[in-house]
Amino acid sequence: MPDPSPVRIAVLVPCYNEATTIAAIIRDFKRYLPSAQIFVFDNNSTDDTVRIAREAGAIVRHVPAQGKGSVVRRMFADVEADAYVMVDGDDTYDASVAPVLVERLLDEGLDMLVGSRVTEEQSAYRFGHRFGNRLLTGCLSAVFGRTFNDILSGYRVFSRRYVKSFAAHSAGFEIETELTVHALELRLPVAEVETVYKSRPEGSFSKLNTYRDGARILMTILRLFKSERPLAFFGIGFLLCTLLSAGLAVPLLATYLQTGLVPRLPTAVLCASLMLLGIILLVCGLILDAVTKARIEQKRFAYMAVPVFSRDAS
């Protein structure tokens, strides 16, 4: 019998000014995943994050393009592993469950496992952030169907197949939304596990702006709706234009049938223009729907081109 192949595990930590917490992150993941390589991807930190990470034994890489999405794009491109554990560098996630998450990912052949945040600490997961997360999760469910309870979690485990087929477009914190949509779009095997979420240590500050980043995430969902469901997106425009055109045309038609005249010519031109616009939107939706299906097929081929990891491989 061949010896089981060793599992290459990479812990990916995107960081921006996390000098207060980065040593604890590295220490904890070394303890619970001793065979894993820990990569810290620094995003232009101005404090001692890089020095502390190196002294703690992590492999440090630099990403000059600002934003978490830019960091994730670089991490996925540069690191080679069989299982990838991505965790924020703020020391709010529970490292002790990492072995369980990795084992479940490998045993069940999953492509993404999301650590859904559960906490009793009000300061850890503020009401505004909790409400915004639920709102955004509801929006994503309405657009893409089946989804997760915590689409904005920064604690995830990925397969190599997922990582090497993911083409990141987002630049900032909206990257978590894109990660979720990629899995739903390709109908990948995924799961969600509740994990303890704790408050940031004293002296550590969140880089998340509730309103600005929430608006960016909403715009990302809208953009993804347009690109991934173009027929539905442009179909809504077609329906609105058609209803408005028909509503304005009804009194004109009634007058014409009674008198044989069209006294409000500008309104008649507006009705025709709206109907024409609606037809153009529908045609755009039909064409882009065909393009989207072809693009998803190509992404699926890229996903399947990556070999499946097997512990039984020689």
Image (cartoon, helix red, strand yellow):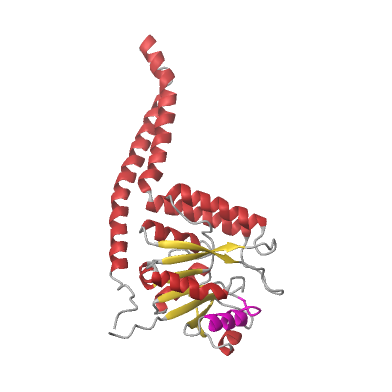
Q: Residue at x 41, y 39 (%)?
A: 237
Q: Is residue 192 visible?
A: yes
As drawn, 256 above or below 21? above
Which residue corresponds to the image point at 40% horizontal and 15% vertical from the top-left? 254
Residue 302 against residue 19 in the figure, above or below: above
Is 105 magenta? The answer is: no
Q: Quick one: 191 or 90, which is closer to the camera?
A: 191
Q: Nearer the viewer, residue 76 or 10?
A: 10
Is any part of residue 64 visible from this angle? no
Q: How many marks?
A: 0
**Can you say whether 30 is above or below 298 in the image?**
below
What kind of secondary structure does the magenta stretch mostly adopt?
Answer: helix
- Residue 50 located left or right of residue 290: right
- Residue 198: x and y in percent read 64, 68
Could you tell me which quadrant the C terminus lies in?
A: bottom left
Classify residue 115 as left or right of residue 269.
right
Which span is picked out in magenta? 17-32
Quarter assignment of residue 127: bottom right
Q: Quadrant of the N terminus?
A: bottom left
Looking at the image, which is closer to me, 27 or 12?
27
**Furthest residue to the top?**
258
Judge from the rendering whether residue 38 lies leftward or rightward of residue 212; answer left or right. Answer: left
Percent x, y for residue 169? 43, 64
